[in-house]
Image (cartoon, rainbow, N blue to C red):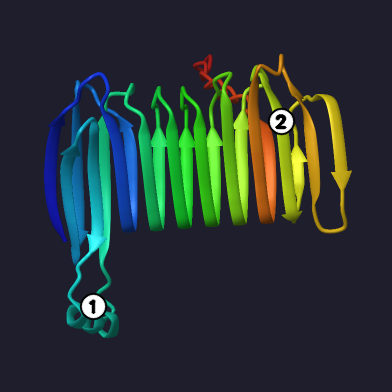
Amino acid sequence: MKTVTFTETVEAKTKLDVLVEIGSVEIRPSTDQNLHVTATYRHMDVWVERLGDTILVHAEQEDDFIQKLTRWFSNDHPKAELIIELPAHCPVQAKTVTGSMEIEGIAAPVSARVVTGQLQLRDIDGPIYAKTVTGRLTYSGSLTDESHRFESATGEIVLTLPETVNAQLSAKTGTGSLRCKLPLTDQREERHLVGGKLWGTLGSGTGRIKAQIGTGSLEIRPFLPKQKEPEKLISKPELV
């Protein structure tokens, strides 16, 4: 595995565009005003380039067919692991074909897609569009009073939200379970033999949440309160 690093200067209008064909990517806030990429990979082409206001970060398979065939039989598959840190104000658009993606702490619009694998989002302070084709999609944190969309064709969607969230909720499963454990007003339901639909208002209903899955489970649940650690017992000296 090789490791390379890149650093790019970020401006007020800078946007991030990421494509990882095979592997994992973590996107999180930086501690300065630059974009930093650390890429560990094998049998992949990794590059960073600037196109207008957009910084492109790509990790794609090498093109040589003979090398691909040789690696297939030797079980030496291509893989990339990317860690990207950037100022939180930058909008993010990211896609992983096969693998995993984690995005947290971005205070701007986020569009994230994973074709096959796992997508985890946390504490996004901006509108969200998140989609998996096959896999698990999770979001944990508060939501802005804007429009948010979570989709999966096959797999699981879990949204963990505070009870203070304000949104009109529209949730749907084609085949599978549908549960909302947050308090809803103006609730309406359609329950079918293999799926269902759910509508309602969370809080003031200022924003909008649309969540749907073709085959699988969809759950919207509240934050669990943290349990206090038990107090340590202090042993008293025995009287002699």
Q: Position of residue 60 (x, y in %)?
A: 25, 60
Horizontally, residue 67 falls left or right of residue 168, namely left
The foreground one among 102 and 174 is 174
Q: Is residue 187 left or right of residue 25?
A: right
Q: What residue appears at the point 23 percent right and 77 percent down from the top-left corner? A: 68
Compared with 217, 62 (above or below) is below
Up the image or down, 3 lies above or below 142; here it is: below
Q: Element at badge 2? A: strand
* Three-letter amino acid code at the position of disc 2: Leu
Q: Establish if 22 lies above or below 18.
A: below
**Tag 1 residue:** 68
Front one among 200 and 122: 200
From the viewer's side, name the closer residue of 96 and 105. 96
Q: How many marks?
A: 2
Q: Residues within 10 Å of mark 2 (few under 14, many from 20)?
A: many
Residue 63 position by quadrant: bottom left
Q: Is residue 151 above or below residue 235?
A: below
Residue 169, picture quadrant = top right
Residue 169, label in figure: 2
